[in-house]
Image: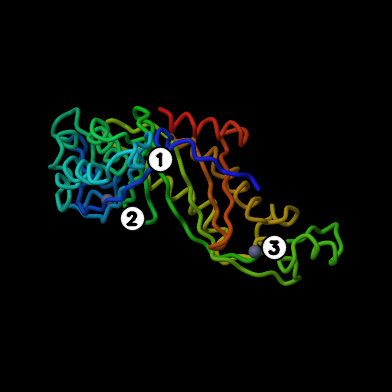
Amino acid sequence: MTEITYHQKHGQGRECVITRRACFSASHLYWLPELSAQENHDKFGKCALSPGHGHNYELIVSMQGILNEDGMILNLSEVKHAIREQVTNQIDFRYLNETWPEFDVSNPEGCLPTTEALVQSIWKKLKPHIPVVSLRLYEHERLWTDYCGNNMETYLTIRKHFAAAHRLAREELSKKENENIYGKCARPHGHGHNYFLDITVKGEINARTGMICDLTALENLVEELVIEPFDHSFLNKDIPYFKTCVPTAENIALYIADSLGEPIKGIGAILHKVKLQESPNNAAEVYPNINSIESRREDLEKVIKN
Ligand SMILES: [Zn+2]
Ligand SMILES: [Zn+2]
């Protein structure tokens, strides 16, 4: 057994990331004065319906620093105070279009208060006060954005659900061999899961629409290419690709990434991550634009250090 030696009391001088959660409710309306009523409705759908609609937002603030002699990177009361003063006191129970000047679209420089634009504004308010390294802002549990202070670059995630059956077995192997590899999952008539699929795209926020891509177009792509064919199917029989490829969570995530990569480029964003949650106990993640696990680690370290 390795003996742990504590060189410093209370971890003083060592690095740590802490997170703090804050909630607020606010409303918004997507409407640009330079577009006609029809164009606004075509572009923003229900989000253009007057006088707007609201969300219960959840904000996760990650901060990095060196532990002081009290065993903290900073006092949590300072963090709470900064989040309250700089963010929630200003926008909780408010109509976002009329809160911060950057959301005043009567000004040609103004931008719609989308979740992507909002997370970027929150970053600017918090950064001078606390050592924030990343922010996550949930509009609801099926849509959130991540921001690391990298100019206009933002990550947008949508969560989808489908139910499907599969059987894990390789055709060329015997029943016994398959059972040795896949256990109960190799039983001949298959079994099912309620899958949760998180699709994360990366892109630059448009300075006017506040969006990294057309959300409706993204939702439609995932719906058409994944959810519609996969939902209530037996993957091994209903999806031609899985007639010859074992539909493990890993293979399904890779197939989804391969199916969505190019179409997502077509709507102006980059597919950053596909996460497929097969059960509460297992999930598979694929990063199609990062070549190896090593470079993904370096990428994450860069993001955290900046
Ligand atoms: Zn909304
Ligand atoms: Zn299974």
On screen, residue 152 above or below 191:
above
Amino acid marked by disc 2 = His
C-alpha gap between disc 2 and disc 3? 35 Å
* Mark 2 within 8 Å of ligand 1, using the beta carbon: no
Is label 2 or label 1 in front? 1
Which residue appears at 57% of the width and 47% of the height?
285
> In the rendering, at what x and y percent does residue 154 appear?
38, 36
Mark seen at residue 266: none
Mark seen at residue 17: 1
Which badge, 2 or 1, is on the more N-terminal residue? Answer: 1
Q: Nearer the viewer, residue 182 or 187?
A: 182
Amino acid marked by disc 1 = Val
Q: Is residue 175 left or right of residue 294?
A: right
> In the rendering, at what x and y percent does residue 187 appear?
75, 70
Instruction: Return the residue at label 2.
Output: 140
Question: For numbered disc 1, what is the local secondary structure?
Answer: strand
Question: For numbered disc 2, what is the local secondary structure?
Answer: strand
C-alpha gap between disc 1 and disc 3? 46 Å
